[in-house]
Image (tube, helix red, strand yellow):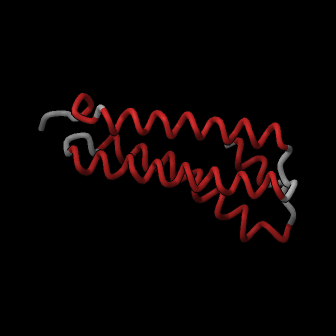
Amino acid sequence: MQIFDLAQTFPETERQLLTEQMLRSSRSVCANLAEAWQKRRYKKAFVAKLNEVEAEAAETQVWLEFAITCTYLEAEVGQELFHQYRVILAGANRLIQQADAWVVPS
């Protein structure tokens, strides 16, 4: 939601480019994590969704870097968000590495 709020301050010219991509990828992290959690009965499906979480989180980091470079985001705010996505990436990676512990028997 913080990204949503901040993206509303981006210039109008970026509303359909950077803003849209950043919002899509950041929301996708949450949605894919929810899907992964529901697919815990199937290890491969669980891990596949977690891989999507990683991909979308990394994409969000790229859009944050663009926003910082273009000065749409203050560097300190953008770097804090970037760090939060680094934490998300680390958590998703741990879930993947320990997938057997999270898979629910059918």
Q: Position of residue 28 (x, y in %)?
A: 51, 53
The image quarter containing residue 104 is: top left
- Name the outermost residue toward the left: 106
Q: Quadrant of residue 101?
A: top left
Residue at screen point 72% across, 35% down: 80
Q: Position of residue 86 (x, y in %)?
A: 58, 38
Query: Image check: 89 left or right of 100?
Result: right
Compared to 77, does 13 lie above or below? Answer: below
Viewer-nearest residue: 54 or 28 = 54
Q: Position of residue 74 (x, y in %)?
A: 86, 44
Residue at the top extreme, as displayed: 101
Give the left or right position of residue 86, taking residue 80 as reference: left
Q: Residue at x 22, y 33 (%)?
A: 100
User: Along the line of sight, which residue is nearer the eye, 12 or 96?
Assistant: 96
* In the depicted structure, whether residue 20 falls above or below residue 61: below
- Whether residue 78 is situated above or below residue 87 in the rendered picture: below
Disc tally is: 0
> Which quadrant of the figure contains the C terminus?
top left
Q: Is residue 73 left or right of residue 27?
A: right
From the top left corner, tell me how far across and down residue 88 is, in percent. 53, 37
Which of the pair 49/59 is nearer the observer?
59
Q: Which image quadrant is residue 46 in?
A: top left
- Looking at the image, residue 11 sits to the left or right of residue 87; the answer is right
Q: Considering the image in quadrants, where does the N terminus appear?
A: top right
